[in-house]
Image: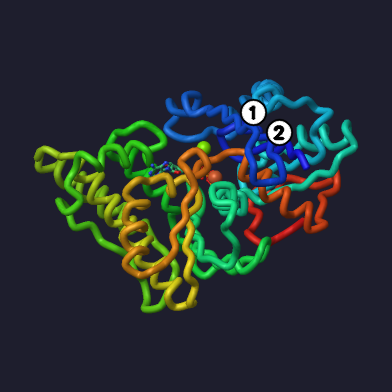
Amino acid sequence: IITLSIETSCDETSVSILKNGRYILSNIIASQIDQHQKFGGVVPEVASRKHIENINQVIDRALSEAKVTFDDITHVAATYGPGLVGALLVGLSAAKAISFALGIPLNGVNHIEGHIYANFIEDPTLKPPFICLVVSGGHTHLVLMKDYGSYEVLGRTRDDAAGEAFDKVGRALGLNYPGGPEIDRLSKEGDKNAINFPRAFLEEGSYDFSFSGLKSAVLNYLNSKRMKEETIDIADVAASFQEAVIDVLTEKTISCAKEMGIKTVCLAGGVAANSGLRELFIKRCQNENITFKYPSIKLCTDNAAMIGCVGYYDYIKGLESHLDINAIPNLKLGERY
Ligand code: ATP
Ligand code: MG
Ligand code: FE
């Protein structure tokens, strides 16, 4: 099976060609970041318009890099949620057109499920069950993946997503959008013990997360320093903030895996690209005798290969989407339409 998959849920126009779901022939990612940077975040209307301008070119590049033509494609997949509705519709409509024109099956894919499946592309031997920490721009979920397509969300954020916290703190520090990669880079030059920012572990036994208190603590710290006209070492602030985030993420995930008796832990989503988070997980999982898996950086952030991988597994399970499938901006993990 040769899958052509499309991802347009946010500000990346991405198209991938995969052989049998796990083997990438091409994975083209056209980022619009420079278009949104001057606004300090993604502008939905701009995103949709840019997807429309880019989509055909990105499809052509994916085909030519994979050295295939439309005649070789036997299956199509596209993200249908969650995400920006106008952005989702561009990729989903293109996928429907290809499915209809070539007479080949279509699978609509959940974007968050895609982030989790990036782990299957990275490691073809990986099998459920495992615990996956999904940390992205809009989501923070602690998920038990019981089987392909079968999930139990054990914990979630009660306010900001982890990536959102990175981006908001990045903005407060005067860094470019998105703040996550910038804070990661700055943290390497700073002292993670310089400032003791709060860790929200919440009630005993809870696997939920909360980052708004930490975000406020950083803002208060910056404001009080500025009021007193004291100098701020932004590398120290970045490193101390990052440490507070990754400390809670790591401890909660590992105690959850131990409690559930699960011996494999995976990371997924854009924040999984964070070097501090990856290092801390490697260290802690080694101590606890837990197998730890994480996708390469390119597969952590938004890309179409992870979407094609979900579409492939759904398809071989006998699932198929109809041409009237619609974009669902708030699609939940495990829900299907
Ligand atoms: P969602 O997947 O929830 O719909 P999204 O698709 O916009 O949201 P992703 O592309 O998965 O989000 O991830 C983007 C987020 O990851 C941004 O918040 C960004 O700051 C963060 N991020 C990317 N790289 C890093 C890094 N190295 N360290 C920390 N955060 C990072
Ligand atoms: Mg993005
Ligand atoms: Fe994403």
Identity of the residue drawn at 43% across and 47% down: 271
In the image, 19 versus 336, the foreground residue is 19
- Badge 2 marks a residue whose secondary structure is helix
How far separated are the C-alphas under marks 2 and 1?
7 Å
**In percent of the image, x 50 and y 24: which residue is there?**
35
Rendering quarter of residue 206? bottom left
Residue visible at 79% across and 34% down in the picture: 73
Do labels 2 and 1 touch, CB within 8 Å?
yes
Residue highlighted by disc 1: 51
Q: Quadrant of residue 37?
A: top left
Left of 299 or right of it: where is 45?
Answer: right
In depth, the one of 284 and 227 nearer the eye is 284
Question: Residue 282, image x and y in percent?
Answer: 35, 57
Which numbered circle lies on residue 227?
none
Measuring from the top left, give residue 198's x and y in whole percent. 25, 61
Asked whether residue 8 appears in the rendered view, the answer is: no
Q: Which amino acid does the dot numbered 2 rest on?
A: Val
Residue named by callout 2: 90
Q: What residue do we see at 42% from left, 75% from top?
A: 258
Q: Nearer the viewer, residue 83 or 236?
A: 236
From the viewer's perspective, tell me whether residue 282 is left or right of residue 142: left
The kind of residue on which mark 1 rests is His
Query: Residue 223 sits in which quadrant?
Result: top left
Whole-percent x, y for residue 319 in the image: 81, 56
Tag 1 or tag 2, which sits nearer the N-term?
1
Quadrant for the C terminus, please. Answer: bottom right
Mark 2 neighbour class, 10 Å CA radius: few under 14, some 14 to 19, many 20 or more: many
